[in-house]
């Protein structure tokens, strides 16, 4: 493994150089950014893979949903369609992507859109008959042709960006210096019982600038939900499974693994690559592995994102009659962090006086670019 990292190091240096030049062109105004007439909040990270962007977008939706008309805009990672699409009751993960479908099914009174061109996507939302009052950009930290009013950067407690390296040696999409663009940095997946010593240590490592606010959040598991409608409810508080088969297609399943080990006698893991599209042979293998488990009480548990894909195509037919559940979870802030974070977001929005429909500012040096 170390030899591979050494061999890939020149590519990481080149990747980092290209990213620095690109950021410099935006910083110098050679590449132009566009800002819009309504509050646009970006949630993203420096690293490839899961660091908690989706639960953070959901936290913002829950915080703002009662007072603002919310729209989420994503590129729709790994979808099989192109251009601007609005989610509706017929949408599938292959059409709009896992996360957008999750938002749509979870929050019925928000607008959910996808477009690989974020500028075009925002313009399309603003041109609708009942436009949103706030747009949440999902995974948009590197999409700099749109200048958000507020930029939130999330980083995983188990490996913050200061301990990572550039792709392909590590998982960094751009150099660490890019973190300076964020007004808010959130360390996700921190321990629920969080000592001041650990907080101070991580704060010193991240070195937030004077213009940046640093917050810490943790994962709160809410229980199991059936992937398929005909399944009965299953409460981990009322019964302890003999065996849980954990099926995941996410970048970092470790926190979920740790939790599930604490609520069952045996955990069998079947990991797939991040955003894996389950094919019939994958599903047949899962069924076979499950049938081979000799346990009194056994269930299959997956993530909410994976559940979106397990509802597509032949999945339900192949896994029919199996107890397939997803583990519902959300981000929660530590008590003082929650008060300060909520106040920061609400203060930002209350001070935003522009009306939707006002002209955007900035210009595009290449209107056809799809970033």
Image (cartoon, rainbow, N blue to C red):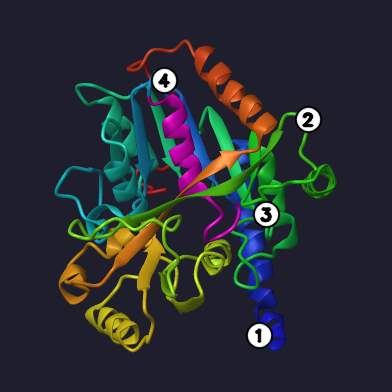
The answer to which image quadrant residue 293 occupies is bottom left
Residue pointed to by mark 1:
4
N-terminal of the two: label 1 or label 3?
1
Query: Which residue occupies the foreground of this view, 169 or 315?
Result: 315
In the rendered structure, find residue 157 and report the number of the disc placed on it: 3
Magenta part of the chain: 46-65
Q: Is residue 341 above or below residue 226?
A: above
Query: Disc 1 to disc 2, how far (Cα)?
Result: 39 Å
Query: Disc 2 to disc 3, how far (Cα)?
Result: 21 Å
- Residue 140 visible in image: no
Q: Are marks 3 and 4 in contact (CB under 8 Å)?
A: no
Q: Residues within 10 Å of mark 4 (few under 14, many from 20)?
A: some
Magenta span: helix, strand or loop, mainly?
A: helix
Seen at 67% across and 84% down, the residue is 7
Question: Element type at marker 1?
Answer: helix
Q: Are marks 1 and 2 in contact (CB under 8 Å)?
A: no
N-terminal of the two: label 2 or label 3?
3
In the rendered structure, find residue 210 and report the number of the disc placed on it: 2
Locate residue 199, reporting x and y percent: 79, 44
Residue pointed to by mark 4:
37
């Amino acid at each position: 493994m170390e030899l591979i990292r050494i061999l890939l190091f020149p590519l990481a240096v080149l990747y980092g150089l290209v990213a620095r030049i690109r950021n410099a062109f935006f910083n110098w105004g050679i590449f132009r950014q566009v800002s819009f007439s309504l509050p646009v909040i970006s949630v993203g990270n420096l690293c490839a893979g899961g660091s908690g962007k989706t639960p953070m977008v959901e936290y913002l939706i829950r915080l703002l949903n009662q007072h603002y008309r919310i729209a989420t805009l994503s590129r729709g990672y790994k979808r099989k369609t192109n251009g601007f699409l609005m989610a509706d009751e017929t949408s599938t993960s292959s059409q709009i992507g896992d996360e957008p479908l999750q938002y749509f099914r979870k929050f019925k009174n928000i607008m959910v859109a996808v477009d690989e061109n974020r500028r075009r996507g925002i313009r399309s939302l603003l041109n609708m008959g009942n436009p949103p009052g706030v747009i949440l950009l999902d995974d948009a930290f590197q999409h700099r042709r749109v200048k958000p009013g507020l930029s939130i950067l999330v980083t995983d407690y188990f490996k913050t960006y200061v301990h990572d390296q550039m792709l392909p040696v590590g998982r960094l999409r751009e150099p660490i210096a890019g973190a300076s663009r964020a007004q808010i940095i959130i360390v996700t997946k921190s321990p629920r019982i969080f000592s001041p010593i650990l907080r101070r240590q991580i704060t010193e490592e991240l070195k937030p600038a004077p213009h940046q606010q640093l917050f810490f959040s943790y994962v709160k598991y809410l229980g199991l939900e059936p992937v398929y409608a005909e399944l009965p409810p299953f409460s981990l508080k009322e019964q302890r499974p003999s065996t849980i088969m954990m099926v995941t297609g996410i970048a970092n399943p470790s926190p979920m693994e740790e939790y599930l080990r604490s609520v069952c006698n045996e955990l069998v893991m079947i990991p797939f690559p991040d955003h894996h599209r389950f094919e019939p042979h994958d599903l047949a293998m899962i069924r076979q592995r499950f049938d081979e488990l000799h346990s009194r009480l056994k269930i299959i548990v997956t993530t909410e994102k994976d559940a979106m894909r397990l509802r597509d195509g032949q999945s339900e037919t192949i896994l029919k009659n199996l107890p397939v559940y997803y583990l519902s979870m959300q981000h929660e802030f530590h008590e003082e962090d929650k008060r300060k974070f909520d106040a920061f977001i609400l203060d930002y929005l209350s001070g935003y006086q522009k009306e939707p429909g006002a002209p955007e500012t900035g210009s595009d040096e290449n209107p056809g670019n799809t970033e």
